[in-house]
Amino acid sequence: MNLKDKIDELLSLNPFQLSASQKKEELMKIIKLQIEHHLKYCKEYKNWYNENSFFSPNNIKDFNDIPFLPSSVFKYMDLKSIRKTKSKIIRSSGTSTNLKSKIVIDISTSVNQRRSLSKILAYIIGKHRKTFYVLDAKPSYDSRSYEVNARVAGMQGYMIAAKSIKYLLVKKGDKLTLDKSVFLNLKKNSDAVLIGYTYMIWKHIVKNDSFQLKKTESLNNLNLIHFGGWKKLSDLRIGKKEFTKTIIKKLRINIRKIFDIYGFTEQLGTVYPSSGYEDCRVSSFSHVLVRDVNTLKILPDGKSGFLQFISPLPLSYPGFSLLNDDVGKISKRIKGKYGEEDLQFEVFPRLNKAVSRGCGDTLPENYYI
């Protein structure tokens, strides 16, 4: 079975049904094929792999053995594993250095991303489509454009689960204001999804006096999905627990229907949902390891380090195993009621990281492409 067929087979499953051993068996088969694929089609990846004398794919036996690139490499190099085929460029929102990752997405990779995200969304909010209320203004986006920024691309992905889309904000000059008619419509809709970037939720709902419910009103049946934007809240000393507690009070919403989604541009479609006060849950479509910030050796559960993310989805670029600058720990690893793996990790606020340097500062010189 070829790489694409193996990925299709995995993505046909329930995203949270495999046991740890079943998931490892399926992912390891795919990752070995992934390595072979990118060695064949990405010259820079092949040079890097050979220069560092990594195991040949067939000799990789464990997740720990899978070579990883620092996610920041996509800010400095154009890495792609495709020839002449239709593709788009996704650019990250950038950092304080103003450097943005550049990710090449072809049709096959896009399909993988959409399938993964749709299966995980269906698991957390249900299979039937709902009205999505987006906490943003309607984007002026040309679908024919060769380049897409991560904010637009990230939000677009979630719209696959929408039967209709309404935008809660309108742009007036340089400011975004609440569209009160859409807000009234939201209050009347008993089965809907409110979705937006975390900081936007805080700014335009929590801190917005126009967004108020009457004493007899509640949004108990509403699903709230939020993601990204934690850097700005960290600057305000607002953590996840306080954010969630405040949202519950403001919207009178069921805590089990608040979903914080962790993910990043370099592995779009691979997402890690958390419900209420819980940590990020790892699906059967991915895996997470924690590495020591000094030695990069694998750490036991509960110990803090750089997070390594393994995803079977990318075909058009070598982003299937990435170490990023986020620091976190494995907070839960148990066997569920039916034998399924329940693996969760906590990501620490960037303000409170143990080290100010990124994972790139830890890697040896010959490790870079």
Image (cartoon, rainbow, N blue to C red):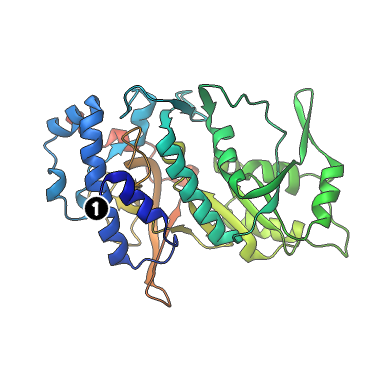
Residue shown at the point (83%, 39%) measured from the top left: 179
Q: Tell me the quarter of the picture where residue 196 sits.
A: top right
State the residue in front, 73 or 96: 73
State the residue in front, 334 or 115: 115
Q: Secondary structure at mark 1?
A: helix
Residue shown at the point (44%, 47%) measured from the top left: 270
Residue 222 in the figure: left or right of residue 157: right
Residue 190 in the figure: left or right of residue 82: right
Residue 273 horizontal/vertical position (percent): 51, 55
Kindly tell me whether residue 368 is visible in this rendering.
no
Kindly tell me whether residue 241 is visible in this rendering.
yes
Q: Is residue 300 above or below residue 169?
A: below
Residue 186 horizontal/vertical position (percent): 79, 51
Residue 157 horizontal/vertical position (percent): 55, 42
State the residue in front, 225 or 130: 130
Q: Residues within 10 Å of mark 1 (few under 14, many from 20)?
A: some
> Which residue corresponds to mark 1?
29
Residue shown at the point (61%, 50%) measured from the top left: 161
Quarter of the image with the C terminus in it: top left
Q: Is residue 262 above or below residue 20?
A: above
Q: How many marks?
A: 1
Residue 333 horizontal/vertical position (percent): 37, 67
Q: Is residue 288 above or below residue 293?
A: below
Residue 237 in the figure: left or right of residue 164: left
Residue shown at the point (36%, 35%) measured from the top left: 71
Residue kind at label 1, given as amino acid type = Lys
